[in-house]
């Protein structure tokens, strides 16, 4: 599978990455090479192999349902660019 | 053309845990902004999510309640999208391997018929924060208290064929999660939210293109939003247009759905397994403990009510609508004895009073014990049904127990035949002309005219005379 310039533009937009137009073709080439590698792996017969969700052979540890965090809003908001009435302020998002 | 509506629902039930799904921050509703958002919820660098055991237990209970295939191994995945109330840039959800597999629920329609609706899956995920678009000098305010609150997203099959069926299904899921105690079901506070996938097709044809309706926070709006959308799609198709797949917001003020722009491009969520979380593996011991104390579920309870208390379907449905009401009813029966009478009073006088005051059953000033005490006095003929309503009102107003009120207000029914006879004699003496008319009337007319005398006697006794005895006495006295 090979990626077109437009695919790269789309992926870059979804990831909010600014890719220089002059670089689009070379990035498309690099990403396509990676996909070729994936294609080779896809060609391997994996019948009966459970897909690996995590490299560690362990199950998730569970936490008791206990509230053990206290209010540290002031601390966290001291590094925020803008706050008001306890809210974090961000550039306006239009729905 | 005849159109068929096809509806599937995605329901988000907020799980009633104390702490968040991946952090130890509190989930209580209504706290000051960002006071319940810890480093994990804020997505600060270096933090790691640790799964809340209780959220998993709740999913297992739900699975058992809908007879679903519980997946002993499930995997959390990252759903990637950018929005400021999602600080990590991804939502931790489940994708390919959800915890709850295929299940089903039965819905009862208004005409009494039952339908089975398939549940495709249910998965655990975290909620996002809240964006406040009111004016903050052209900026948007973000409250992350809700970020990381555990959700169970319950996805149905496209099995519903009308807005009414969709509402019946949503109510059924609502009833189940509340019976299980895994969600408080509060729709105003957003603890229970439904998105509807709606499409139309000519009968028997392939599925049409669907629109997803969001922003629905009541059962009434769910019905209205679907009905509006169905009309819109049919009009569009009949005038030669096509339905586009999109997300639409329901606006209750204008009773319409509107296209939400900019959504199409966001549909690529690039899911992948979350490397911060290991697969969830459930052994027999865990599952057995999770479902050890399952409550009796609403459908089972409804059937039992019909059999054990000889109730009709309508009463049984109403009395098992929620667990608190069903518990109240059964406590009333234990205290009062007569199941049929208890059903009449709980669905009648009590439900009416609660409705009038806008109260939930848990807030009723008349406890099941108190109501049972009242019903005992009706059963043993201490008071008539009519006086009982007066006693009920006094109990509602904080006048004490039924016995106290009957005692203090002197409401005990007059069953002493000597005392009754005195009243009856007085009424007969005071109404000579009616008595003469009665004696000359035929039997049919007499039956009607008797009501006049009964009324007078009841009036004279302030409603305390035993109606049965009064009738007998009057018939005897009025006989020529």
Image (spheres, coloured by chain):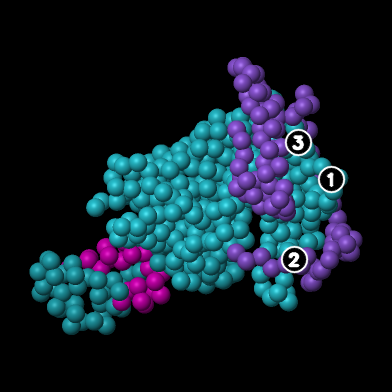
To which residue does mark 1 refer? B47
- Where B213 falls versus B48 (above or below)? below
For disc 3, the marked residue is B275
Give the colour of chain B: cyan
* In the image: residue B217, left or right of residue B430: right
Q: Position of residue A89 (x, y in %)?
A: 76, 67
Q: What is the span of residues highlighted in magenta in the rendered image?
A: B456-480
Q: Position of residue B315 (x, y in %)?
A: 40, 51
Residue nearest the observer in this picture, B422 or B181:
B181
Which residue is painted at 33% across and 44% down in the image?
B113
The chain letter under disc 2 is A
Question: Please, what is the dominant secondary structure of the magenta stretch?
Answer: helix
Q: Nearer the viewer, residue B195 or B138?
A: B138
Which SS class for mark 2? strand
In this rendered view, identify the residue nearer to me: B333 or A38: A38
* Image quarter in which the N terminus of chain A is found: top right
- Residue at point 78% right, 61% down? B34
- Which label sits in the foreground, 1 or 3? 3
For label 2, the residue is A90
Q: Residues within 10 Å of mark 2 (few under 14, many from 20)?
A: some
> Can you tell which quarter of the image residue B21 is in?
top right
**C-alpha span from label 1 to label 3:** 13 Å
Q: Is residue B477 magenta?
A: yes
The letter of the purple chain is A
Q: Is residue B144 visible?
A: yes
Question: Between disc 1 and disc 3, whose residue precedes?
Answer: 1
- Protein chain holding label 3: B
At label 3, counting other C-alpha atoms closer than 10 Å, the crowd grade (few under 14, some 14-19, many 20 or more) is some
Work out whether B442 lies above or below B38: below
């Amino acid at each position: 599978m090979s990626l077109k310039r437009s695919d790269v533009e789309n992926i870059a937009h979804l990831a909010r990455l600014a890719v220089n137009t002059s670089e689009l073709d070379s990035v498309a080439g690099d990403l396509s090479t990676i996909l070729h590698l994936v294609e080779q792996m896809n060609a391997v017969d994996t019948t009966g192999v459970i897909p690996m969700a995590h490299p560690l052979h362990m199950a998730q540890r569970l936490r008791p349902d206990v509230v053990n965090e206290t209010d540290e809003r002031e601390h966290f908001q001291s590094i925020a660019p803008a706050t008001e009435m306890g809210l974090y302020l961000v550039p306006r998002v239009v729905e | 053309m005849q159109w068929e509506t096809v509806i599937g629902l995605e329901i988000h039930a907020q799980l009633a845990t104390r702490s968040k799904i991946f952090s130890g921050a509190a989930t209580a509703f209504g706290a000051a902004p960002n006071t319940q958002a810890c480093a994990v919820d804020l997505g600060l660098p270096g933090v790691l999510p640790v799964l809340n055991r209780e959220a998993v237990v709740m999913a297992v209970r739900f699975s058992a309640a809908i007879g679903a295939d519980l997946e002993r191994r499930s995997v959390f995945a990252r759903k990637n999208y950018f929005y400021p109330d999602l600080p990590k840039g991804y939502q931790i959800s489940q994708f390919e391997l959800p915890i709850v597999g295929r299940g089903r629920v039965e819905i009862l329609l208004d005409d009494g018929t039952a339908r089975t609706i398939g549940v495709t899956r249910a998965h655990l995920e975290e909620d996002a924060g809240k964006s406040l678009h009111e004016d903050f000098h052209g900026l948007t305010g973000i409250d992350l208290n809700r970020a990381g609150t555990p959700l169970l997203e319950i996805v149905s099959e496209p099995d519903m064929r009308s807005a009414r069926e969709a509402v019946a299904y949503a109510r059924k899921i609502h009833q189940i999660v509340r019976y299980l105690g895994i969600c408080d079901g509060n729709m105003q506070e957003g603890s229970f939210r439904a998105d509807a996938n709606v499409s139309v097709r000519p009968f028997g044809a392939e599925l049409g293109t669907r629109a997803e309706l969001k922003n629905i926070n009541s059962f009434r709006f769910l019905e209205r939003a679907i009905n509006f959308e169905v009309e819109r799609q049919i009009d569009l198709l009949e005038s030669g247009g096509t339905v586009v797949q999109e997300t639409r917001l329901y606006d209750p003020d204008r009773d319409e759905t509107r296209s939400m722009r900019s959504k199409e491009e966001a549909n690529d969520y690039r899911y992948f397994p979350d490397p911060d979380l290991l697969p969830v593996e459930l052994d027999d011991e865990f599952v057995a403990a999770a479902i050890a104390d399952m409550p009796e579920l609403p459908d089972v309870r409804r059937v039992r009510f019909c059999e054990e208390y000889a109730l009709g379907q309508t009463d049984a449905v109403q009395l098992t609508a929620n667990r608190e009401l069903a518990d109240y009813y059964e406590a009333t029966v234990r205290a009062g004895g007569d199941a049929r009478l208890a059903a009449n009073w709980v669905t009648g006088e009590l439900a009416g009073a609660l409705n009038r005051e806008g109260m939930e059953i848990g807030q009723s000033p008349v406890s099941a014990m108190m109501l049972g005490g009242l019903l005992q006095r009706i059963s043993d003929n201490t008071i008539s049904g009519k006086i009982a309503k007066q006693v009920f009102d006094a109990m509602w107003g904080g006048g004490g127990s039924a016995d106290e009120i009957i005692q203090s207000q002197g409401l005990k029914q007059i069953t002493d035949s000597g005392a009754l006879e005195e009243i009856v004699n007085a009424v007969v003496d005071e109404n000579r002309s009616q008595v003469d008319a009665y004696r000359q009337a035929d039997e049919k007319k007499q039956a009607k005219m008797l009501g006049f005398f009964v009324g007078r006697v009841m009036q004279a006794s302030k409603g305390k005379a035993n109606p049965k005895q009064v009738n007998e006495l009057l018939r005897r006295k009025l006989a020529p």
